[in-house]
Amino acid sequence: MIYLSSFHFATEEAEWRFFAGFQRTCYDSFYPFQIFPERGLHALDLTDITILYGGNGSGKTTALNVIAETLHLRRGAPFNGTSFFRPYCQLCSPHLLHPLPDASCILTSDDVFDTMLDLRAINEGVDRRREELLAEAKEARNAQFRMHSLEDYDRLKQVAEARRTSQSRYARRRVMPNVRTRSNGESAFLFFTQKIRDGALYLLDEPENSLSPRRQMELAQFLQESARFYHCQFILSTHSPFLLAMPGARVYDLDSDPVRPRPWTELENVRAYYDFFKEHEEEF
């Protein structure tokens, strides 16, 4: 399913017109202005799976953020924008074939890490409360207590329970269990499979981070099936050869000038892997 068929970035002429009517003061950066014309990136013609490939500083993450902000997509973690981001997005031209579903969003590595940190924080809070309850049970079990009035009834129940049960059971009845934690790779893979639902546009920024090669292949299969059977469209940035090799994906090489689609087997990063394994072929 193709919701966004093309995206045109601000032209060099539009950027010049903006600055001609702009009263300059002391700004260190006009980001994201003056980035894409220099790299020869003017427009993206999009398929159901479109990939932005390039080295560090090539602009692939910036391109995803520009598309996301222009389309007002939902996002979790904030990004490093500037006061010029919104004016720049107003100069861009998206072409939609269908209205964007509400579930459409941008998902980044920061979202994955924030989710894992949230789970750890929850478990740390649970652990602290459990320690407090164990100490409370020990104190109640050894307490010298007499009931003098009905106001002491709750304390009586506490002491009685502490004496007839173990400290661990006393704590378990009063605190939630730890949230199940997984490895970073398992958590990252689960994050994407839970967040990506039927029928929406998803922007993914380097989703291979924290994923093992096998998990990257599983993610590639999941994205292909979501696009083919569940009406999803994806635009993603990646260095992963396992994602770059997805059949039918259109891969833009942001390291080339001008930016253009290229076969994944011609990309510098992939060729480096190929040459390395060819050099060590006899060792396998």
Image (cartoon, rainbow, N blue to C red):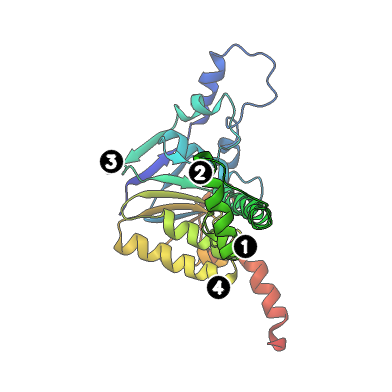
Sequence-first disc among 3 and 1: 3
| Residue at 48% from the left image edge and 70% from the top image edge | 218
- Residue 141 placed where, x, y %? 65, 58
Q: Secondary structure at mark 3?
A: loop
Rounded to the nearest whole Å, what is the CA distance between mark 4 and mark 2?
Answer: 26 Å
Quarter of the image for the N terminus: give it. Answer: bottom left
- Residue 99's tag is 3
Q: Amino acid at mark 4?
A: Arg
Of the residues tagged 3 and 1, which is closer to the observer? 1
Of the residues tagged 2 and 1, which is closer to the observer? 1
Sequence-first disc among 4 and 1: 1
- Residue 214's tag is 4
Q: Secondary structure at mark 1?
A: helix
Residue bearing mark 1: 167
Marks 3/2 in contact by CB < 8 Å: the verdict is: no
Q: Residues within 10 Å of mark 1 (few under 14, many from 20)?
A: some
Of the residues tagged 4 and 2, which is closer to the observer? 4
20 shown above or below 38: above
Q: Amino acid at mark 3?
A: Pro
Q: Amino acid at mark 1?
A: Gln
Residue 217 horizontal side relative to residue 27, left or right? left
Of the residues tagged 3 and 4, which is closer to the observer? 4
Q: Secondary structure at mark 2?
A: helix
Rounded to the nearest whole Å, what is the CA distance between mark 3 and mark 4?
Answer: 35 Å
- Residue 224 placed where, x, y %? 39, 64
| Residue at 56% from the left image edge and 52% from the top image edge | 158
Sequence-first disc among 3 and 2: 2
Which residue is outermost to the top?
23
Residue bearing mark 2: 64
| Residue at 34% from the left image edge and 55% from the top image edge | 232
